[in-house]
Amino acid sequence: MIIITDVEFDEKDQEWEGCEILDPDSGQTYDCEMWLDIGQLNVRGYLSLFFRTQIWVRATTN
């Protein structure tokens, strides 16, 4: 299942923009942008003027 599409990296802002993200529970897609912080990926999904940001961290295996 593909959850993020149309990703373009903006070197000026150092973030990925212009992409869409899929909510697998509802099946809806949202505009999104992503950027890196130390050890984490910030993913922000937009619906008009409203947004929600999630912090994604790398899963570790033992």
Image: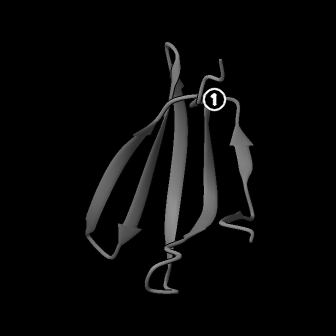
Q: Quadrant of residue 12?
A: top right
Mark 1: which amino acid? Lys
Instruction: Judge by depth and name the residue closer to the eye, 2 or 21.
Output: 2
Q: Residue at x 38, y 66 (%)?
A: 46
Where residue 56 sits: x, y (%)?
48, 37
Q: Residue at point 54% right, 43% down?
A: 34
Q: In this figure, which colouring scheme has been used for the structure?
A: one colour
55 over 25 or under it: above or below: above
Residue that appears at 49% across and 13% down: 38
Identify the residue at horizontal 74%, vertical 71% (top origin): 1
- Please state the total of marks drawn on the protein image: 1
Q: Position of residue 61 (x, y in %)?
A: 66, 23
Residue, far front? 62
Screen quadrant of the C terminus: top right
Q: From the viewer's side, name the closer residue of 23 and 29.
A: 23
Residue 7 in the image: state x and y as whole percent.
73, 55
Q: For the residue labelled by badge 1, is the local secondary structure a helix, a strand or a loop?
A: loop
Q: Residue furthest top?
A: 38
> According to the image, label 1 marks what residue?
12
Disc 1 crowd, CA 10 A, few/some/many (<14, 14-19, 20+) = few
Q: Is residue 23 above or below residue 60?
A: below
Q: Position of residue 41 (x, y in %)?
A: 52, 33
Residue closest to the far bottom: 27
